[in-house]
Image (tube, rainbow, N blue to C red):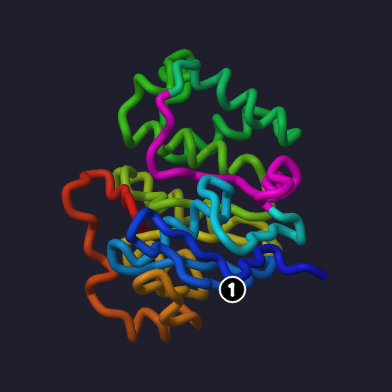
Amino acid sequence: MHPLVDIQAVSKRYGAVQALNQVSLQIGAGERVAFVGANGSGKSTLLRALVGLVRVQGRVLLAGVDVAKSPEIALRQVAYMPQVAPPLDVPVAELTKTILSLRGVAPDRASAIARQLGVDWDQVKGKALRDLSGGTKQKILAAVALASQAPLLVCDEPTANLDAAARDPFFELVRQRPAGSALVLCSHRRDEVAQLVDRVVELSEGVVLRDGPAGEVLAAAGSALWTRPQGSPDGVEVHA
């Protein structure tokens, strides 16, 4: 049987910057994995390669299907929660209905999850996503991703814009996902990593520095892992 995620000798260069250098790793069904590292380590590029957002050398396979060659098939396995919401001029209710209908999931599942995260659904459902606050956008994206029931949930800094009242419900909703489902997240937040994953992959200068049980890797990792990127309030990394 194929691993759910199979990253094979993946490299990526941005001009003179080698963001990833021959990275290989596998993630099986049921695993919960965090990519961590200092700013510029390559973790965000690796996460984006996983969901087909950047072209790379090497191969990324999801359940045995090459993301670059057959994205429409491979990405059926994935629910993706980006850190920064796209500026979509479409009502929230219409957006959630469209996305979840492609998954065969009732849209009221997303609205129920959004309410658990503190969203006043009746107030936001008719508003365009781009007109909402950053925190509300992230809650909507989280609700859609969690409602989709995809085998693999991929999250980029999932609680970066969540208020304190929404963080614990989000952690609990992730923990409630089926035992066979997998989670991959990129995070600068130690508490988030400690609560959500059992395996940590630490990257440094585009290569895997450590890969192992979360407790061991977190104990060995330095404080630089938890430093927010400078000059970017939302934590977006350009070359990482």
Quarter of the picture containing the C terminus is bottom left
Residue 137 or residue 176, whichever sits in front: 137
Kindly identify the residue that appears in the image at 42 percent across and 86 percent down. 216
Q: Is residue 79 left or right of residue 197?
A: right
Residue 30 coordinates in the image, percent (x, y): 66, 67
Q: Residues within 10 Å of mark 1 (few under 14, many from 20)?
A: some
User: Splitting the image into 4 quarters, where does residue 97 fall?
Assistant: top right
The magenta segment: 67-87
Q: Is residue 150 above or below residue 29?
A: above
Kindly identify the residue that appears in the image at 41 percent across and 74 percent down. 202
Residue 94 coordinates in the image, percent (x, y): 57, 18
Please tell me whether residue 78 belongs to the stretch shown in magenta: yes
Residue 79 or residue 195, whichever sits in front: 79
Q: Is residue 43 above or below residue 170?
A: below
Residue 128 coordinates in the image, percent (x, y): 43, 17
Residue 226 or residue 118, whichever sits in front: 226
Q: Is residue 47 above or below residue 211?
A: above
Q: Is residue 237 left or right of residue 182?
A: left
Kindly identify the residue that appears in the image at 47 percent across and 18 percent down. 122
Q: Secondary structure at mark 1?
A: strand
Residue 170 coordinates in the image, percent (x, y): 45, 50
Query: From this viewpoint, which residue is outermost toward the right?
Result: 1
Give amino acid for label 1: Leu
Kindly identify the residue that appears in the image at 47 percent across and 70 percent down. 21
Q: Is residue 94 left or right of residue 202?
A: right
Residue beneath disc 1: 25
Tally of numbered tags: 1
Q: Is residue 199 above or below residue 158?
A: below
Query: From this viewpoint, which residue is outermost toward the top?
Result: 126
Please tell me whether residue 16 belongs to the stretch shown in magenta: no
